[in-house]
Image (spheres, rainbow, N blue to C red):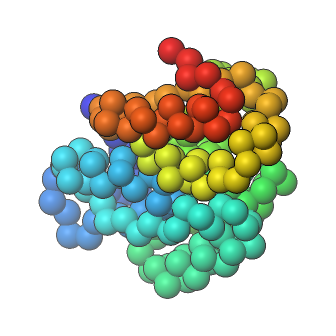
Amino acid sequence: MDIVSKYLYLELVRQGGTMGRVSRQSPLLISCSILKPEIKALIEGKKIEAKAIFLNKHLHMDYQKLQNALKASLRKHSGKKPVVVYGDLCLGFNGEMNVLMADYDVVKVDALNCIDCLLGGCGKLLQMDPDHRFYFLTAGFLDFTEKLTLGLKEDTRRRFNVLKGIIVLDSLGDIDRHWDRIEQISDQTGLPVLE
């Protein structure tokens, strides 16, 4: 069982869910669509039993829009006791996500952001990158990153110039088919892909 399966398993068990067994009512995940490929692979591979709702990853561009979408989804599915698969920092840096989770009395995965979730949560991202010097990239993060890097190369490089490089996470074992896109992102940002 990979790290993401183990991590989601613990959260689902806390909600009375199961792994790969049929139950009367599958737990509901409310997740950022950036994690859709990984979560769908886990569900389809029967590594977790859950239903999932994915909110648009581009909501991250506006904290208020993301918060409104989360509130609407939490209200709509309040009787299902959903597990929220978002990071602590997805609504801002002042505990906004934890306040929202407390307001709706729901469980959220213990992760700083989507990348931390993929690494197993509990701040593992900070252990790998305590100074925030690397840009982590997965297949699911490519579209979002390409949108961030639109425009003049000089402007993009200026936005990314505090970083040392790109670390590619192959969460689905298919990163090779995306290598051209990764190289384009590397060129646009001026960041080398690190091994």
In the image as oriented, which residue stretches furthest toward the left?
22
Q: Is residue 86 left or right of residue 48?
A: right
Q: What's the residue at 19%, 49% (across, down)? A: 46
In the figure, residue 52 lies in which quadrant? bottom left
Q: What percent of the width, then of the height, locates residue 140? A: 44, 48
Judge by depth and name the residue closer to the eye, 163 or 150: 150
Judge by depth and name the residue closer to the eye, 26 or 194: 194
Q: What percent of the width, then of the height, locates residue 81? A: 46, 70
In the figure, residue 94 lies in which quadrant? bottom right
In the figure, residue 178 lies in which quadrant? top left
Q: How many marks?
A: 0
Q: Is residue 13 above or below residue 32?
A: above
Q: Is residue 130 above or below residue 94?
A: above
Q: Is residue 42 left or right of residue 67?
A: left
Q: Is residue 169 above or below residue 98?
A: above
Q: Is residue 112 above or below residue 126?
A: below
Q: What's the residue at 70%, 53% (across, down)? A: 151
Q: What's the residue at 24%, 45% (across, down)? A: 47
Q: What percent of the width, then of the height, locates residue 187? A: 61, 32
